[in-house]
Image: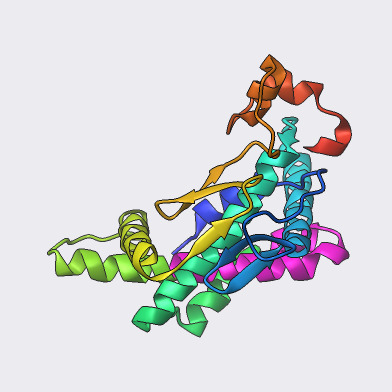
Amino acid sequence: MRPTRAAAALAAAATLALTLSACGTHPGAAATVGAKPIGTGQLDQVASAICSAQARNQQQTGASQALSSRSNRELALGVLIDSRLSTAYGDALGVRPSQAQLNSAAANRQQLIASVPSRYRATLTSTLADLDKSQLTMAEVGRRQLQQSGATNITAQTAIPAGLKARNAWVTKHLDVSVDPRFGTFSNGQLKAGSGSLSTAVSTKAVDGARTQPPATWLASLPASQKCS
């Protein structure tokens, strides 16, 4: 299986130049999954590594689109949460990818990892490995679900959504997930984007910035420190 959705998510992610503290989670945590926190420091490291990968991707493809660092930090948190949920569900079912599958996925990532500065490589390697494990687990869970319903010609594109559906139902019953409200809210197995602030958006610019996909004019108005480009 080629976990292309995870790669696309990583290629689009970036850092956020905002200082956030935890609210409604463990102190210093951006989110908690079960009893395990995802610290803001860890999130910053992952987002920085992803931002570097995004910059290299733009250089190689000639793309010029800058990305809101707030939106992409939320995306990075979503990636971390999603990986933990899938791994927890797989562990509960006793479903784990084979080492051969993980090695194959890791080999496909080497060029991307080698393209970023050395200070980001360990974090990017770990994040990508967790994502590969997550997708491979969901593909296997979904394959089993679809086989039980009599489906044939099962592919990763059909198996992964089936696995995620089963996972999200399990999470609702068995796992508590909380998120700092400045990063968003957690609902139905997914992180819903927040505004990056505890205050209510009032001005047109603030409302634009609170959107999941802010307009290009809003993005263009941001200082360089709040973009990944």
Residue sitting farthest toward the left: 150
Residue at figure coordinates x 81%, y 44% from the top left:
18
| Residue 131 is inside the magenta segment | yes
Q: Which residues are magenta?
A: 110-136
| Residue 107 seen in render | no
Where the C terminus falls, by quadrant? top right
Name the foreground residue: 28 vs 5.
28
Residue situated in front as seen by the camera: 4 or 195: 195
Taking the image as shown, residue 132 lies to the left or right of residue 90, namely right
Residue 52 locus on image (x, y percent): 79, 51
In the image, is 218 to the left or to the right of 19? left
Residue 37 percent coordinates (x, y): 64, 69
Q: Which quarter of the rendered picture does the N terminus lie within?
A: bottom left
The relative height of residue 228 versus residue 9 in the rendered view (above or below) is above
Tell me the quarter of the picture where residue 113 sits.
Answer: bottom right
Q: Is residue 198 above or below residue 82?
A: above
Q: Position of residue 178 (x, y in %)?
A: 55, 59
Q: Is residue 35 left or right of residue 165?
A: right
Up-down: is 34 above or below 45? below
- Residue shown at 48%/73% (left/top)? 87
Q: Coloured how?
A: rainbow
Q: How many marks?
A: 0
Residue occupying image coordinates x 36% and y 54%: 157
Majority secondary structure in the magenta region: helix
Question: Where is residue 149 drawn, in percent x and y?
Answer: 14, 64
Asked whether the viewer can see residue 63, the reply is yes
**Magenta span includes 71:** no
Residue drawn where x is 60% and y is 73% of the image:
36
Instruction: Please identify the quarter of the rendering in which residue 126 is found.
Output: bottom right
Residue 165, compared with residue 84, is above or below; it is above
Depth check, front residue: 183 or 5: 183
